[in-house]
Image (cartoon, rainbow, N blue to C red):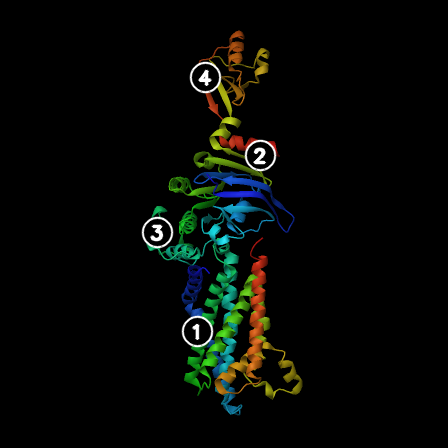
Amino acid sequence: MQPIITISGLSKTYASGLAALKDVNLEIRRGEIFALLGPNGAGKSTLINIVCGIVTPSTGTITVDGHDITNDYRAARSLIGLVPQELTTDAFEKVFNTVSFSRGLFGLGKNPAHIERVLKDLSLWEKRDSRIMQLSGGMKRRVLIAKALSHEPKILFLDEPTAGVDVELRQDMWRMVRRLRDSGVTVILTTHYIEEAEEMADRVGVIRKGELVLVEEKAELMRKLGKKQLTLHLPEPLAAIPEDLADHHLELAKNGSELIYTYDTRGGRTGITGLLTDLAAAGIRFQDIDTSQSSLEEIFVDLVRDAA
Amino acid sequence: MNLPAIQAIYKFEMNRFWRTALQSIVAPVVSTSLYFVVFGAAIGKQSQMIDGVPYGAFIVPGLMMLSLLTQSIANASFGIYFPRFSGTIYELLSAPVSPFDIVLGYVGAAATKSILIALIILGTAAFLVPLRIDHPIAMLLFLILTAVTFSLFGFVIGLWADGFEKLQLVPLLIVTPLTFLGGSFYSIDVLPTFWWVVSHANPVVYLISAFRWAFFSKGDVGVAISMGMAALFLALCLGAVTWMFKTGYRLKS
């Protein structure tokens, strides 16, 4: 299937000389949730802003559903809804009016039924006649999402959508994003919250210092780069790890009552059999055993550290 | 052309106008009425007729033009500056609208507002002084041309300004003095020769002169020359706006 967004050779150098993006190539698949991860200043927002027409690229081309964002910008932009990172709203406008305004800006006629549906989906219907300045931060965030959905976009960009919102609203948003994906909308989100990507994304891109260092299926990424830990619960605490076990790079935890063995899932051999044999030879018994997999956050931290 | 977008911008701007009706309408009407009281009644009573027109009536086109210019600039400059200041400009930049659509929406609304205010001033004046309009169609056309031109100028200022102070700088320090010195309250023919010549470098002289001609069939400068100057200024403002959008000046990084 043809990708819905194709980014080729994209670079952006600001007038200050800052190279925000360096030769970025990326394809976004139709109907997926793509999470763009990266530390502050990595270039995530610049990338989104270029696709949406807010920032001018230095070099490279971008097509949205086959429409070039420069030469055929009307067709390209009409497919996109953008929820910006900052809570930028018209403070004096009423909720219903500002969402209707956004629909008009995208060239669509009035459709109060659609606006009502969007506001109800986002629990904003009761606030439709409130001025935006009277709303809480979380509600303002919902208004921004409602504005982005007012013109029924095929692609939704969420730039740090849950920054500064409470847990309840965050989970509401996750549910909404899944509903959108189920209805065929492609969602691209940037986030600092790794659990957000882990929870929602189909694929993950990691950007660092303007370079896209990795694009991978989330599950594949976790399988390939994830590390597992084997924890052995000991009936008798150990004061130190015997020298015979030094090759296994074990760690002692909980005052010597746990032995932790970290292994790489990418390797064909995990080394567990050898470890268990050596433990038996050393006379160390264990009463329980469990394993845990590293989270996407740990993988992300590793990736960024490796690239540094 | 994205007609729903133009309508949306226009309606949004007009809503702001009605929301702040006290500031938008009442304030200019009160201040203009004060001009009538001070210049028309207090000074005008002792003044001669000017070109056969009572002084109170003579200053009406100038006062209308004074409001038209300042309001056009203020409305258009604030209209585009505020989204830049608040950050909501992202929505305009990411929408499927051309620069032409944006300008049409903002300038159209700003021009509408200033024309409304000018007509309210005209209505107020009609209660206070004996008025006649010899060329009503020409008066309306010139009103629209000037409102559009100076709204465009205001739009340029709104794009150029990087703070509220700069937003006020050009209207306060350039446009208002030029309007006061442009024959709002007198005929430049009464000036000494040197200042008469200097006055011809003031573009506002041509606007007020043509506007006054529409009322009383008399102006300081020929109507054709005035129209030519207004058209030239319109072309300059259009050129500036086009360049700003083309280069993304103060809009895109």
Calculate the distance from the C-alpha at mark 3 to the C-alpha at mark 1.
35 Å
Q: Is A216 located above or below residue A79 in the figure?
A: above
Q: Are discs 3 and 1 both within one chain?
A: no
Mark 4 and mark 3 lie on one chain; the one further toward the N terminus is 3
Separation of residues labelled 1 and 2 (CA atoms) = 60 Å
* Res. A89 image quadrant: bottom left
- Left or right? Give the position of B80 relative to A146: right
Inspect the image, locate mark 2, and give the three-letter code of the amino acid beneath it: Val
Q: Residue furthest right?
A: B194
Residue at image mark 1: B116
Q: Amino acid at mark 4?
A: Ile
| Residue placed under numbered mark 3 in the picture | A114
Q: Residues within 10 Å of mark 4 (few under 14, many from 20)?
A: few
Mark 2, mark 3: which one is toward the viewer? 3
Front residue of A292 and B227: B227
Q: Are marks 4 and 1 on the same chain?
A: no
Q: Which is closer to the viewer, label 3 or label 1? A: 3
Residue A270: % across, % down = 52, 18
- Real-space Cα separation, disc 4 to disc 3, in angstroms: 54 Å
The amino acid sitting under disc 1 is Leu
Classed neighbour count for the residue bearing mark 1: other residues with Cα under 10 Å, few (<14), some (14–19), many (≥20): some
- Circle 3: element type: helix
Which badge, 2 or 3, comes first in the chain's sequence? 3
Rendered image: mark on residue A304: 2
Mark earlier in primary sequence (4, 2): 4
